[in-house]
Image (cartoon, grey):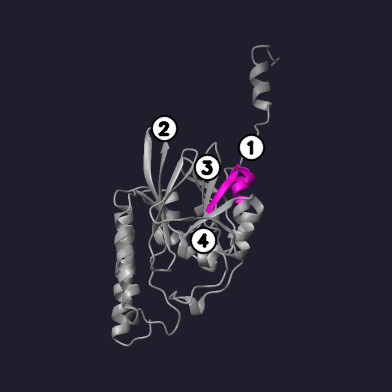
Amino acid sequence: MPLSFATLPVLLLAATPVAPAAPVPPTVPQACAGRDGWSEPTVPQRIFANVWYVGTCGISAILITSAQGHVVIDGGPRDAGGLIAASIVKAGFRLGDVRWILSSHEHHDHAGGIAELQRLTGAKVAATAPNAAVLETGVPAPQDPQSGDLTPFPAVRVRRVLRDGEVLHLGPIAIKAHATPGHSPGSTSWTWRACEGRTCHAMAYADSISAVAAPGYRFTDHPDYVAGFRKALARVASLPCDLVITPHPSASNLFDRLAGKAPLAETGACRRYASQGFAGLQARLASEAKGARP
């Protein structure tokens, strides 16, 4: 049967090869499935609005962006500074536009990469006074409960020492420092507001709250430190926060939340997070009272 002109376009269309769909970039939860190493690289992922996850599979680092420049919180361990920088670039941002680097606490797994990140970006570092004192030497503070187990890290030049409650401004970004000592003497939590359209969230980068110590250290022997720890936990509980991020992503179930397996934001997020710290501190004190090895 001869082909008619009416059927020819249909046949040509059927014969046209269909281009394969472009692969969908993996998310952080997908890229980190079965991996939680402090220095294991992952992809960048937007958390909400102008806030991005640029950390590793086991340690958080976040990027807060604006047209006037960007802020990074935390630098991961020593060999993660370059990984965080690479994630910032992969997310589509210029390293030279990072203006400030902030720190949660002065331990090698969160501050070890700050010096390299500072070198790569040219950014200034801001921290609260107890945190800054260790950042500038790279040597753990002797009063830190974990000091016997901590590793020195590359020293960082701190350009601005922030008071408790002080707000750092960069264009539309206004991020507030909250001293929350306990996990370390310089522990600092950070809060700010992020909006996407008409949807806004009270954001918190709430510092670690676990009562961890080096062998031989007993919290019971340091009642003033414990009292300060309890006060800090109460402060974390009172932070304005419905979207919480933590230096260890697993501590706030961040990857499940990014994967949609749990709510990303929830009223009382910081209060629930702080309750974990209260429970952990009480368990530690009870263990010490029984003479058990924590």
Q: Quadrant of the C terminus?
A: bottom left
- Secondary structure category for the residue under label 3: loop
Of residues 77 and 163, which is closer to you in this image? 163
The total of numbered circles placed on residues is 4
Question: Residue at (65%, 32%) from the top-left corner?
Answer: 18
Residue type beneath disc 2: Gly
Q: Which residue is mark 1?
A: 20
Rendered view: 24 above or below 86? above
Disc 1, SS? loop
Q: In the rendered image, which residue does mark 4 sit on?
A: 59
Depth check, mark 3 against mark 1: the one in front is 3
Q: Earlier in the sequence, mark 4 or mark 1?
A: 1
| Disc number placed over residue 65 in the picture, else none | 3
Q: Is residue 181 above or below residue 213?
A: above
> Mark 4 to mark 1: distance in Å?
35 Å
- First in sequence, mark 3 or 1: give its number: 1
